[in-house]
Amino acid sequence: QVRLVESGGGSVQSGESLRLSCGVSGYTFTKTCRGWFRQVPGEERKGVALIEGDSVVGYADAVKDRFTISEDSTRSTLYLQMNHLKPEDTAMYYCAAELGSCLIKPDGTVYRSTGIVGAWGQGTQVTVGS
């Protein structure tokens, strides 16, 4: 099972930006669903932004127009550009791939292929101060 590696998290002030990266040496993402999730302690993990095939599937409403998901041309690294960060964006951010097919609802709920575990990273913490 591939273990993805996230980087780029940190502590910033409200209004600032961060860019998260995700990948692993020697690994190329397939075109199945992949993207970013986040989780706050005591709450369920929610989708942030997803890609499937060559297209963006969607964003959670909470991050729309502030966050941008992208992928390098070799499909070896996923990115999440996070602008105008808010304290409510504070969470552990996880990268995931090999999720089959997926869709994301406005509240961040992700529906994806059943029976597919996918590949996940261990997460990178993002903390936004007010």
Image (cartoon, helix red, strand yellow):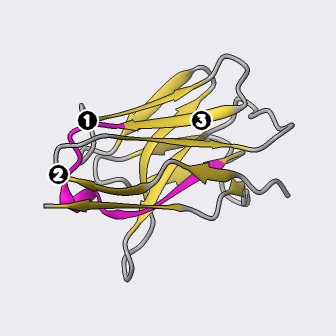
Residue contact between numbered discs 3 and 1, judged by CB atoms under 8 Å: no
Identify the mark nearer the N-term, 1 or 2. Answer: 2
> In the picture provided, is 73 more to the left or to the right than 89?
right
Quarter holding residue 127: bottom left
Spatial CA span between label 1 and label 2: 13 Å
Quarter holding residue 30: top right
Nearest-to-viewer mark from 1 and 2: 2
| Residue extending furthest toward the bottom | 42
Spatial CA span between label 3 and label 1: 17 Å
> In the rendered structure, which amino acid carries the disc numbered 2?
Ser
Q: Residues within 10 Å of mark 2 (few under 14, many from 20)?
A: some
> In the rendered structure, which amino acid carries the disc numbered 1?
Arg
Q: Nearer the viewer, residue 17 or 76?
A: 17
Write down the region rendered in magenta.
82-96
Circle 3: element type: strand
| Residue 80: numbered disc | none
Q: Which residue is mark 1?
A: 66
Q: Which residue is mark 2?
A: 14
